[in-house]
Amino acid sequence: MLRMKAAFGVPFLVLCAVLCQGQIPDTMTNTAVADYVMIGIDDKSVIEEIRNAKDTAFDLSPEGIKALKAQKVSDAVIEAMKEKQAAVNQFEAAGLPFFSGLYCKPQDTWRSVGKVLVSEQDTGETSKGLSVGSSNHIKVKHHYKYKYNNKSAGLQIKGPRPTFYLRQEQASQDFEQLTVIRVEQKKDFRQVEWWTITDGQTTTMAPENPVVIKVQAKRLRDDIVAYTPESDLNPGEYLMYGNNIGYAYEFGVVE
């Protein structure tokens, strides 16, 4: 039961939103915790609510903690948030295979997500021109076609937004930022077209007319990172690229 301290002057809508809810939200967030504190709920009750939460989505980055403290959330409550988040993360990663690699858990069975290397690279047209800016470097644009063996990946996942889990060889090492790209299926291979653009100082790469989905990364433990696409994936074939464009993790999405 929530116990309140004196909370005169608290905005009525905030007070009503929390009290009329009647129960803890399914996912406890920084905002929910700050709202409880704002209306005068005592620390002991807030900590109890955090511990009883079904799920959490706390931002416990230095910026997130700074914002919590600015909203007068106590150190004891923040520590309870850290403990709860660690417990949720540990449960989510339970049973992950011991060996390093990227995994997914479709239908409650852990599956390794395979890596695929570029099987063939075709160089298409090249164009040159002056770049815009004071330096007037020559801009060179190259067109490539990256081909990958087989029409589809061995791993086919049901569900539009799967979560992938990376077990690292070394705890707390930097982890790759991944990007999901839908690939074009041909008769017996898959293909992605890329442009590289060099302006004399830097080279950037960009896929041509792709479906590109950003991936949200969350560290669950010192040696485990979870990756989830930020938007739903339609049925089709996908590659997930990291820092090395020469290989990608392959998977498909089915209805």
Image (cartoon, helix red, strand yellow):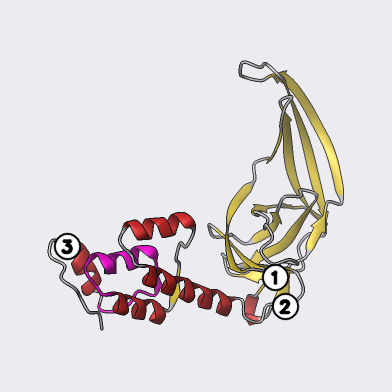
Kind of residue at badge 2? Pro
Reading the image, the residue beneath label 2 is 97
Residue sitting at 30 percent across and 75 percent down?
43
Reading the image, the residue beneath label 1 is 103
Residue sitting at 80 percent across and 46 percent down?
146
Residue sitting at 17 percent across and 60 percent down?
11
Q: Quadrant of the N terminus?
A: bottom left
Kind of residue at badge 3? Val
- Mark 2 element type: loop
For the magenta stretch, what is the residue range?
A: 22-42
Residue 61: % across, % down? 49, 59
Tag 2 near tag 1, CB within 8 Å: yes
Residue sitting at 72 percent across and 50 percent down?
243
Q: Quadrant of residue 209?
A: top right
Kind of residue at badge 1? Tyr
Q: Nearer the viewer, mark 3 or mark 1?
A: 3
Classify 54 as above or below 203. Answer: below
Q: Nearer the viewer, mark 2 or mark 1?
A: 2
Q: Quadrant of residue 37?
A: bottom left
Residue closest to the eye, 9 or 215? 9
Most distant residue in the left direction: 8
Label 1 CA crowd tier, 10 Å (few <14, some 14–19, many 20+) = many
Identify the mark at residue 10; answer none if there is no mark: 3
